[in-house]
Image (cartoon, helix red, strand yellow):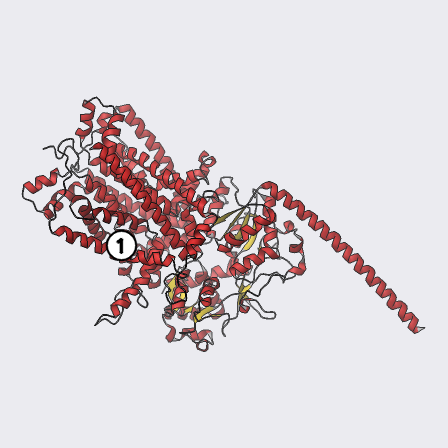
Amino acid sequence: MPLTAATSPPRSRRLHLRPIRLAELSFLLFLAVVMGLPLLFLLAGSFNLSAPGKPSLYGIDNWLRAFTDSGTLSALSMSFTLSVVRLIPAMIVSVLFAWLIARTDMPGGKFIESVCWIAYFVPDFPLVLAWILLLDPNFGFLNSVARSLPGIEGPLFNPYSFWGIVWVHTSTGGIWFKVMLLVPVFRRLGATLEEAARVAGAGTTTMLWRITLPVLAPMILAVSLLSFIRGLQSFNTELLLGTPAGIYVYSTKIYDFLQREPRAYGEATALGSVFLLVLAVLLFFYWKFLSGGRKFTVVAGQGYSTLRVKLGKWRYVAFAGCLLYVAVAMLLPLTFLVIGSFMRRYGFFQIAAPFTLAHWQNMLTDPIFLVALKNSMIIAGTTAVGGVLLYSALAYLLVSRRTIAAPVLESLSWIPHVLPGILLSLGVLWLFLATPLRFFLYGSVWGIAVALILADSPVTTQAFKAGLLQLGADLEESARVSGASWIYTYRRVLLPLLAPIAAAVGLMNFGSALTSISTPVLLYSHESRPLAILLLEYSFTGELERAAALGLLITAIIGAMMVVGRKLGLKLAGSAQ
Amino acid sequence: MTIVKGEIVMGRALLLMFVMTIAWLSNAQAQGGAGEKEWAGVVEAAKKEGKVVVAGSPDPVMRNDVIPKFTARFGIPVEFVAGRSSQIVSRVETERASGIYSIDVFLAGPDTSANELYKDKMIDPLKPLLVMPEVVDVAKWKNGKVWFVDPQEQFIVRAFSSVATLLFINTEHVKPDELRHMKDLLNPKWRGKISSEDPTTTGAGANKAARFYVQLGEEFVKHLYIDQKPVRTRERRQMTDWLARGTQPICLDCREDDVRPLVKDGFKILEIFEIAGAGPTINGSPWMLSLANKAPHPKAAQVFANWILSKEGLETYAKGYGSATLRTDVDESFLNPGNVPKKGVKYFDDTDWKWIVGGRHENRDKVWKLLKAR
């Protein structure tokens, strides 16, 4: 049974030595410049003690100041604790969701998946406020409902607490991102392995535990790694819910240094370097795991089957469970958010004539709205297509065992994930201004798109890499034996198999580009201002209702693109079958 | 004879007065004419530059009122780079390090204006460029002149001076009589009932704590910010909502423009400007005006700077933002009377140059040390 072919993807065998070296060198040079240089600028800047415009004076004072600042260590410890506590249940639920959606006959899987996609792109700031309206100990809707129950007097929920932060964070972004990345790889898992296990007498749980999860380990680990570091950098939820309770996280400390006047970028970079260290340690174990002689190939040239696990009567229970989670974690606050965008004052039902269309009208008639919409569509489209093309090629190169510099290439591709957004933006700004790129990228929509493509590097590369690791060598070998060129093989064999992943990450990048604030904030100009910056301006000036309306509009655009993207992905995937 | 002499003297005096009046009027007219001519020349040159780039806070009034009015008046489009001062200055510094000069006008807060734009020599003298007749007319200014706050009195204009709110209370939960003296804030009854912008980081919360440190001393700050367990936030909307709902009915750092809509909606919220124990305060919010050096559109920048200091410019901003200007001819009927500084009252000036460049930072550091060491 050709179920698990050799781990080492054979694509390198397809390429002659020179082209792969050329590709490797090109990527090395490209990543060193676009990822390494901004980091270098930042690190060098962190040792510069003089004020802007003054001759440089180097020393370690910024680093000392950053790490001796009171509260830094306790904030770091709180960040780690929160990140770990959030990660474990979120990964369990995400894997379960992905498995149920992609590998079982649970009804309504596509609906649940669509909700996950939409949920991920709902702006978190108004959503956290919606959770406050639901959970506040004094006026929260759910606490009011709970108080009406017999035997309950005090508030049941409190968002301004450690567990409140864990819950709100998990519900606003903890699950959806992971499900989005995991479903395509679960879906692509050939059923032959599971069928063999079933023939051998394994039950559903044993099959999931002993077969499905181990072969999907690269993606599960990559998603865990991405989520853990993302968790360490998490900021908005902690700011709104943690500050009133005296809970400060590491990102808050970095934010503090960035907000000081004059700004303390040196100290902020010094603190940010902890993320680099954490990444280095985690990547080391990740590589060690992948290179441990394990086999992850799940799509081979023969016997590929996508039959799903039959859950019997439990399929309805599973669907009800998923639906309940989605309803509580997302639909409930989302409903408040939609209502909020039509309220004169978000959450204040007691005022006279509480509902209005004014926020939507004001937003749509804002003279810069249409310009920003056009800019955003150009930026998001370019980011989605550019990211897929670039990082699918990089991932292809990384899984090829012939690349000497794979660890360096991979490390460079992770850099944007460990730099706080505003620092990445500053690094890219330096890169643009210090090179001839400034003449055609600085201040333009294309410059923002390039920066966002760089920011998407870790997620996109890892998603493609995990997908490529699943492909068996015989797929390409068969094509080659049949006389197909590499291009033809890529187009007719690899691309259709990777289409669901490409559609997923392309769409994810499209959505991230529409909602990203920290990356374009130092790069936009009057002409290239995107919707996300408009959203920032509304939030900054306390126009929360208009921000909610704009956030929902962005979510609707992403929803529409999701339908198009899915049809395109399925079409490409379908053409291969 | 005496009568005749007197008549003659009086007649001469009247004649002299008449001649002097005519001469003064002619001179004024000539000067005004020259001023008008110079102004027209500047406007003409500005139009040729095509646009002006203004950096400032994204206050809705700027986008909705100020820019459309300016463009309608002069036909010069405004590119508005909006954002937090820290982000704008970061960007400008990085641009300048690469030889790019993109900003013409800064509408920045006092901290940024004094401690960054001025200190880092990013701005040009503005005084010689003020030529619009109604701007240079000293009679139009409450201080008898345009107020340049920098030591050379050349670079940074302060156009606003409002009495700052000390605190807001929700009178359904706190009676005004219960807060007659600042020490009343330390009543255990208000423990956990006071909200403040997080005083442990840069911002309005830390600035107010620094002022209390100077005015009321370390012990007061310790009792208020530690023992009274005020609920902290960094999101201004959160504080305003707490105030309206009464969960934290005393708000130290809510903003007047955030609270105004609540009052219109019938919430029983009282703005308090002064309580015994702490003197009243004025500040220069929302911005101070300065011109970038090496500006790409210097004439357009000059026109914008002059116009924003004119009656039309300042009145537009003041109405949208709710601040008292320093012009004498701006309608102030829309303001809460408490916002307008009164003659003869001694105010603590929270935007005073020395305080901004030194005192505030020193005292803020003391507050941080106190609060973080708790």
Give the quarter of the image for residue B150: bottom right
Q: Is residue B268 above or below residue A210?
A: below
The answer to whether residue B150 is seen in the rendering is no
Residue A48 placement (x, y as % from top left): 43, 45
Question: What residue lies at 19% left-to-right and 44% top-to-bottom?
Answer: A102
Residue B37 placement (x, y as % from top left): 70, 47
Give the quarter of the image for residue A481: top left
Q: Is residue A232 above or below residue B180?
A: above
Question: Is residue A534 left or right of B44 when viewed as pictured?
Answer: left
Numbered disc 1: secondary structure:
helix
Q: Is residue A79 above or below residue A29?
A: below
Residue B365 placement (x, y as % from top left): 44, 60
Chain ID at mark 1: A
The answer to whether residue A482 is seen in the rendering is yes
Q: Quadrant of the N terminus of chain B?
A: bottom right
Question: Is residue A238 left or right of A314 when viewed as pictured?
Answer: right
Q: Is residue A153 above or below residue A74?
A: below
Task: Check disc 1: other Cα within 10 Å, few if <14, some if 14-19, many if 20+.
Answer: some
Residue type at the position of mark 1: Thr
Question: Is residue A258 left or right of A300 when viewed as pictured?
Answer: right
Residue B310 placement (x, y as % from top left): 61, 55
Considering depth in this image, is A225 or A504 the residue closer to the camera? A504
Give the quarter of the image for residue A399: top left
Please, which residue is most extreme toward the right here? B1
Considering depth in this image, is B225 or B271 the residue closer to the camera? B271
Q: Quadrant of the C terminus of chain B?
A: bottom left
Tag 1 residue: A170
Question: What residue lies at 10% left-to-right and 47% top-to-bottom?
Answer: A204
Question: Is residue A224 left or right of B167 when viewed as pictured?
Answer: left
Considering depth in this image, is A258 or A356 the residue closer to the camera? A356
